[in-house]
Image (tube, rainbow, N blue to C red):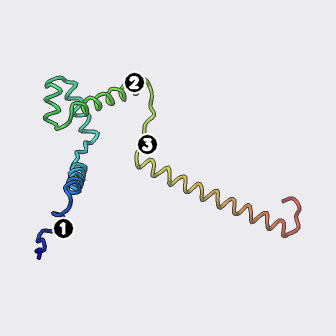
Amino acid sequence: MRQASLLPETYLAPPILLRASAERVVRDIRRATRKHHSAEDKIRIVLEGLRGEDSIAGLCRREGIAESLYYSWSKEFLEAGKRRLAGDTARAATADEVKDLRQEARMLKEIVAEQALELRLLKKSMIAAGDDRA
């Protein structure tokens, strides 16, 4: 007679399933612990690199970023400066501006709806009164 296994079912799973779940756990941990740099941090790092006091590799090592990330930030920084100096003042709206614009649009829609309702009621009252101009 065979004795029942004392191991949990997860230990009895095929190795490919264990590897897939382990990879998923590692991916989730990496995603959760990924660094998010603020705009101020990006500008500070790019300006330090442009000063040239330290090598780019040393700067990136100290900041814990990849060199390719530094160069993409640097390119974005310089392109934005070039556009601004060329007179291109278009920019993305801030969250507060978007919120204000949405609120204004909502108020304007309400005004239009109220006026349309009033116009409809006036037309109906004119027709009920026997006025043919409606």
The residue furthest bottom is 1
The disc placed on residue 62 is none
Q: Is mark 2 on a helix, strand or loop?
A: helix
Q: How crowded is mark 1: few (under 14 residues within 10 Å), some or many (20 or more)?
A: few
Mark 3 lies on residue: 93
Q: Position of residue 132 (x, y in %)?
A: 89, 61
Q: Who's the residue at 36% across and 27% down the image? A: 79
Q: Position of residue 32 (x, y in %)?
A: 24, 52
The disc placed on residue 85 is 2
| Amino acid type assigned to the residue bearing label 2 in the image | Leu
Q: Where is residue 56 in the image (x, y as percent from the top left)?
A: 18, 27
Distance (Cα) linking label 2 and label 3 = 19 Å
Q: Is mark 3 on a helix, strand or loop?
A: loop
Q: Who's the residue at 42% across and 23% down the image? A: 86
Mark 1 lies on residue: 9
Left or right of 134, for residue 76: left
Relative depth, front residue between 41 and 4 = 4
Relative depth, front residue between 44 and 64 = 64
Image quarter where the N terminus lies is bottom left
Residue 37 sits in quarter: top left
- Relative to 49, residue 13 above or below: below
